[in-house]
Image (cartoon, rainbow, N blue to C red):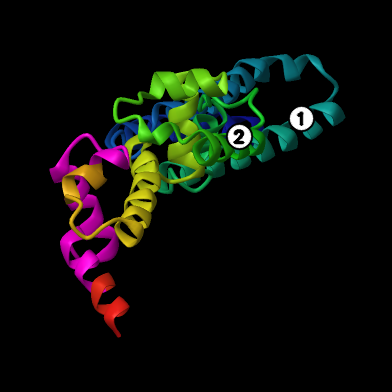
């Protein structure tokens, strides 16, 4: 009797699951569909194995009936959870995160960050207005992709922004020490900027004033 009920349950709930899965196709990812399909395959295999239970003694057959019912209940519980809450187990996200490729797997990140900052302060490579990511990455003995990930992921900066922060520091130092008659453009070029407009934009963004106003404030402070 239990076997008959189990058989009817498998056929009925398999039909309901397929219909529900089709209606929920937008919510369920490909990976989750695959898992649902696998669960249903297990149930179908169980169903095909039922006739074999009649070749076994009654006591063992009773235990198998109970086993099949429990497997059925657990499987359909999981199917229902996957359909109603496809993000509950976040399996797709887990698989995706595991397979995200990093260019820095074999790189000592802390060592390269220290080396990068040391090069910037000691060799002042940023003073070269034409410095490229390829040149800097070659100096660090890493690829351009690795340098980009090093800056973007671990310093939260783009390559150009990283260079320009050093150029701004140099420009401020020159503005404080240079002759007031020295052209702003000359200071910009000496600091490594290859565009006056870029220099003014970065300066205003970081100091909320123009280089000219910054210099005027310095002169006012000196006269006090």
In percent of width and height, residue 106 lies at 65, 22
Query: Quick check: marks 1 and 2 in contact, CB under 8 Å?
Result: no
Residue at the far bottom in the pictured view: 224
Point 22% across, 34% down: residue: 194
Q: Quadrant of residue 49?
A: top right
In the rendered view, does 57 fall on the left or right side of 196? right
Question: Which mark is on residue 73?
Answer: none
- Above or below: residue 141 compared with residue 169: above
In the rendered image, the quadrant that contains the N terminus is top right
In percent of width and height, residue 73 lies at 60, 42
Q: Nearer the viewer, residue 193 or 146?
A: 193
Residue at numbered disc 1: 64
Q: Is residue 194 magenta?
A: yes
Question: Which mark is on residue 115?
Answer: 2
**Magenta highlight range:** 189-217
Label 1, label 2: how far apart the Cα atoms are: 66 Å
Q: Nearer the viewer, residue 196 or 41?
A: 196
- Above or below: residue 38 compared with residue 76: above
In percent of width and height, residue 89 lies at 53, 44
Q: Residues within 10 Å of mark 2 (few under 14, many from 20)?
A: few
Q: Quadrant of residue 44?
A: top right
């Amino acid at each position: 009797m239990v076997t008959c009920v189990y058989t009817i349950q498998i056929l009925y709930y398999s039909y309901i699951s397929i219909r529900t899965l089709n209606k929920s196709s937008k919510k369920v990812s490909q990976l989750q569909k695959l898992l649902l399909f696998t669960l249903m395959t297990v149930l179908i295999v169980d169903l095909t194995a039922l006739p074999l239970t009649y070749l076994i003694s009654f006591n063992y057959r009773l235990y198998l009936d109970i086993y099949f019912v429990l497997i059925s209940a657990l499987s359909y519980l999981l199917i229902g959870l996957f359909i109603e809450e496809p993000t509950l187990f976040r399996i797709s996200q887990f698989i995706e995160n595991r397979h995200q490729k990093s260019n820095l797997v074999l790189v000592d990140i802390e060592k390269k960050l220290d080396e990068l900052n040391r090069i910037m302060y000691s060799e002042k490579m940023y003073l070269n207005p034409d410095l490229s990511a390829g040149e800097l990455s070659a100096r660090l003995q890493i690829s351009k992709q690795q340098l980009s990930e090093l800056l973007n992921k671990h310093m939260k900066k783009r390559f150009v922004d990283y260079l320009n922060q050093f150029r701004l520091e140099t420009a401020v130092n020159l503005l404080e020490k240079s002759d007031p008659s020295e052209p702003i453009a000359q200071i910009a070029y000496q600091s490594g900027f290859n565009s006056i407009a870029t220099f003014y934009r970065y300066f205003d963004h970081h100091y909320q004033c123009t280089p000219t106003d910054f210099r005027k404030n310095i002169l006012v402070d000196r006269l006090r």
